[in-house]
Structures are given as structure tokens and as C-alpha cells.
Image (tube, helix red, strand yellow):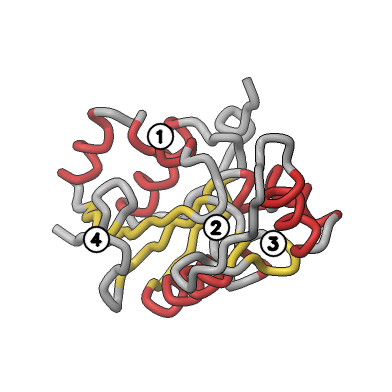
């Protein structure tokens, strides 16, 4: 049996797309039985996939230098990249911050917020630095397949993964792309 290795990550988002991934329920077990192998996911807390991973799935927009580094590393290590959900595909609601400078955002969020007393923006090197603008995944790296939706349904995620594990190129039909 041929295997299909998959790694996933989330960037600037709500994790709703990964919840839809888990909503495949027993179909996820079915896919594993067909040869799907999860090499790294935020669900399992494995962050870096091994070199030669077949498919990298990215949820969320690219908003920090850490996100940018992570999606570039995933692109380097994976044969194919899938942008999962509206935030990854289009930038999503997070692009609303693109109307402000990073300095304005940090000042409002940490200094002048009504609930803040003597606040200062965080300076830890462990925190990702905000990029000047939030971008979609394809603005950072080459994306091979897009799955829109907020979040996309478990059915469409299953369809795409099943097609890939069967060795076919997925096609998203109108019945799969509905917004309830």
C-alpha cells in the first residue's frame, strides 16, 4: 500500500479548520487505513514535518515572522501545499488590521485599551513580530491547492484527502462548496 504523508499547521486563525478536520470522525480512520500518515500537526503538538512529506496543510493567515518562517519551511519540506480555509486562502478577517500600522495596533492593544493600566507592548524575542501586513498563504509561498470556507466542511476536507490518497487530483464541485 502506498502511503500519503501529511503535515498540518495553523497560523493566524481560530483553529476552526482543524476542528473540521477532526469532524471527519471515523472517515479519518478510514483514510489512515488507505495509507494516510499524519507526520506533524498542531493537534499532536508535532511542529516540524520530516523532509519529503507529501502534503503540507496550512490553516490561517500569515501575520508574524514566525508564521512566515513556518510556511516557508513547510513549503521546503512538502511536495504539495494546501491552503485550508478562508484565512489561508484570502487572508480572512485578520486582514482588517492592514488598515493600521503595527505601531498603532500595539499601542492600542497594550497601552490605550480601556482595561489596560500602565501597559507596554510585549518585547519578548519568543513572540513573533507582526508583519507590516497580514497576507494569505499564497502571498508567502507557492500553494498547490486551495480549500475555501470558514471553516470548510469535514466533507470537503475528506473529499480532498481521499482523492489525494487515491492518487487523484481533487476537484471541488459546487455541491462541496456551500456556505451554510
Instruction: Name the residue at the front extreme.
Output: 118
Whichever of callouts 4 and 2 sits on the residue coming sooner in the sequence is 4
Q: Which of the two discs, 1 and 2, sits closer to the camera?
A: 1
Identify the residue position indicated by label 2 in the image.
Answer: 145
- Which mark is drawn over residue 19? 1
Q: How many marks?
A: 4
The percent position of residue 59, horizontal first and vertical second, equals 50, 51
Alpha-carbon span between mark 4 and mark 2: 19 Å
In front of the other: 111 or 16: 111
Q: Are marks 1 and 2 in contact (CB under 8 Å)?
A: no
Q: Name the side, left or right, on which 49 lies relative to 115.
A: left
Q: Which image quarter holds the N terminus?
A: bottom left
In front of the other: 19 or 118: 118
Q: Residue at x 43, y 76 (%)?
A: 73
- Which mark is drawn over residue 39? 4
Q: Name the side, left or right, on which 38 lies relative to 82.
A: left
Q: Name the side, left or right, on which 178 lies relative to 48.
A: right
Q: Which of the two discs, 4 and 2, sits closer to the camera?
A: 4
Q: Which of the two discs, 3 and 2, sits closer to the camera?
A: 3
Q: Residue at x 64, y 65 (%)?
A: 130
Identify the residue position indicated by label 3 in the image.
Answer: 135
In this rendering, does residue 4 appear at all?
Answer: no
Alpha-carbon span between mark 3 and mark 1: 22 Å
Q: Name the side, left or right, on which 93 lies relative to 57.
A: right
Q: Are marks 3 and 4 in contact (CB under 8 Å)?
A: no
Q: Residues within 10 Å of mark 4 (few under 14, many from 20)?
A: many
Alpha-carbon span between mark 1 and mark 4: 18 Å
Residue 23 in which image quadrant: top left
Whichever of callouts 1 and 4 sits on the residue coming sooner in the sequence is 1
Provide the secondary structure element on which disc 4 rests. strand
Whichever of callouts 1 and 2 sits on the residue coming sooner in the sequence is 1
Amino acid at each position: 500500500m502506498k502511503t500519503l504523508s501529511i503535515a498540518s499547521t495553523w497560523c493566524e486563525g481560530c483553529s476552526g479548520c482543524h476542528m473540521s478536520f477532526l469532524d471527519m470522525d471515523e472517515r479519518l480512520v478510514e483514510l489512515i487505513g488507505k495509507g494516510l500518515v499524519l507526520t506533524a500537526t498542531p493537534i499532536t503538538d508535532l511542529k516540524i514535518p520530516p523532509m519529503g512529506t507529501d502534503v503540507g496543510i496550512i490553516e490561517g493567515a500569515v501575520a508574524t515572522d514566525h508564521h512566515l518562517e513556518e510556511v516557508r519551511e513547510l513549503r521546503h519540506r512538502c511536495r504539495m501545499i494546501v491552503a485550508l480555509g478562508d484565512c489561508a486562502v484570502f487572508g480572512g478577517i485578520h486582514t482588517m488590521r492592514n488598515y493600521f500600522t503595527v505601531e498603532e495596533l500595539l499601542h492600542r492593544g497594550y497601552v490605550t485599551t480601556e482595561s489596560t493600566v500602565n501597559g507596554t507592548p510585549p518585547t519578548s524575542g519568543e513572540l513573533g513580530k507582526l508583519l507590516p501586513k497580514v497576507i494569505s498563504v499564497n502571498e508567502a509561498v507557492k500553494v498547490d491547492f486551495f480549500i475555501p470556507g470558514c471553516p470548510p466542511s469535514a466533507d470537503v476536507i475528506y473529499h480532498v484527502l481521499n482523492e489525494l490518497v487515491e492518487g487523484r487530483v481533487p476537484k471541488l464541485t459546487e455541491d462541496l462548496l456551500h456556505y451554510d
